[in-house]
Image (cartoon, rainbow, N blue to C red):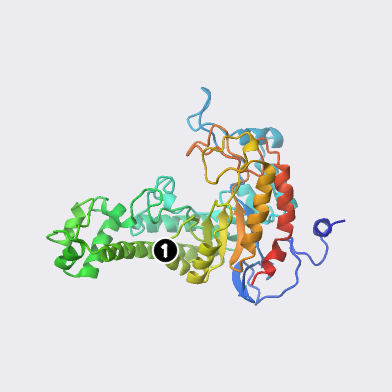
Amino acid sequence: MSERAETLRRYLDGGRGYDRWFYRRNQDFETKRGFFRVQVVNKRAWIIDPDNQPFISLGICHIAYKGDRRVSARADEDASGYSPYAEACDRRYGGDPEAWAAFQAKRLRRWGFNTIGSWASKEMFHQGLAYTVFLGISRRVQADVWLHGDFPDVFSEVFRQAAEEAATQECAPRKDDPLLLGYFTDNELDWNGWRRGTSLFDYFLAKPADTTGKGVLVSQLKERYGDVEVFNAAWDVSLSSLDDLLTRTALQPGPNADPQAVAADKEAYLRLAAATYFETCERAIRSADPNHMILGVRFAGTADQVVVEECGKHVDIISYNNYSYDPPIERLRSIWETTWRPIMITEWSFKAMDSGLPNTKGAAIPVYTQEDRADGYERYVTQALSQPFIVGLHWFQYTDQPPQGRGHDGENSNYGVVGLDDEPHFTLVERMRVVNGRAMEIAKAAH
């Protein structure tokens, strides 16, 4: 019997020496607290589980009974289309999400996963695995804010109320649950214009005069410059008063502007927005639930230095989404050395052309085969966990996307560990099982 098989046998038999997270217990940490937390031990960052043991979060995103709704393609479908995965699950599990969830949890344990990633069906939250909750605070202010490159007015009373509402509804009822790993506040917010093409400064300047964030922008410029003539000289413009900016929707620096001053003004506003966002979210969450971790905002493969600095003051873990061939180690190391907060890669994936799916929409360059996906999984996990500041990886996603494209953005890729028929991609999950079984060994060797 292989070592991995023996480990599995002991776990399933309730053998002594193994904990519920599938890892051998062999190290004591500081005083038990009863909830997940983070700690650095011997120069290696760890998540510490409720039983005071080291924990590497190995998860999968979007483990959802309904799967993805496809773009409507039939006359008898509603406007949002239907989910082929949900249709398969209705047949297989008799329309019972609880039965579905129990079966998926058994699969996840068999494949060496210990965490339910973001956007899961709530039935997955009580299956004995660690789980995460996505609050989507900005989405409560504006639907699909991440998708269009919009940004919430974090300075407004509306945003503060949205944060408090999310905390009241989602955090307070879970404050005593030891299985809860923590909360994501949002997903892939456009801090620097990577999606919309404009800075946050220019984005809020284009807003109506009564927008709170625009008023804050003008107030900040007054504090930075004091006199409008000093501002005019720096930007090479001709304003009669800085209050003129309230009625303008754009401001183009003149040919003799000081580029460093312009860049510093825009960076200062970005920093203030980040500080306000993270402080507002933290205050709301901690008031409702002082026990669990804040897992960050799920940066979209990029994160400005000033945003990272402000984020690190208010979260327990930095979450970072990335779809490159290898993990962006140097960028992640820079984040670690800036914040001294451990990092989870909370979206990453490989998709294969032998799946029969188009793979034309969605992040990541396609590979050829499921074997290539499996190789990618092994390479990526090994490289990531060899870094002492990475404490988890969450694969995107549990099920494949519909070939017609999912309804809200048309993604049509082979991201799943299971197909639309709920059958696993066996080559991939078998390699996941082997690699996940070595995860703690890899992590312990990283200092």
Q: Which residue is mark 1?
A: 307
Q: Is residue 212 left or right of residue 62?
A: left
Quadrant containing the C terminus in the rendered view? bottom right
Residue type beneath disc 1: Val
Q: Residue at x 19, y 70 (%)?
A: 226
Percent position of residue 387, x then y: 61, 66
Q: Is residue 234 left or right of residue 375?
A: left
Q: Residue at x 64, y 37 (%)?
A: 355
Picture quadrant where residue 343 is located: bottom right
Quadrant containing the N terminus in the rendered view? bottom right
Percent position of residue 310, x then y: 42, 67
- Residue at the far right: name it: 1
**In this orientation, does residue 178 appear?**
no
Q: Is residue 250 left or right of residue 186?
A: left
Compare residues 394 and 281 and report the one nearer the observer.
Answer: 394
Badge 1, how many Cα within 10 Å: few under 14, some, many 20+?
many
Reply above or below: 267 against 252.
below
Percent position of residue 106, x then y: 73, 49
Q: Is residue 206 left or right of residue 104?
A: left
Q: Residue at x 23, y 51 (%)?
A: 250
Picture quadrant where residue 24 is located: bottom right
Q: How many marks?
A: 1
Judging from the image, what secondary structure is the residue with disc 1 in? helix
Percent position of residue 208, x then y: 24, 50
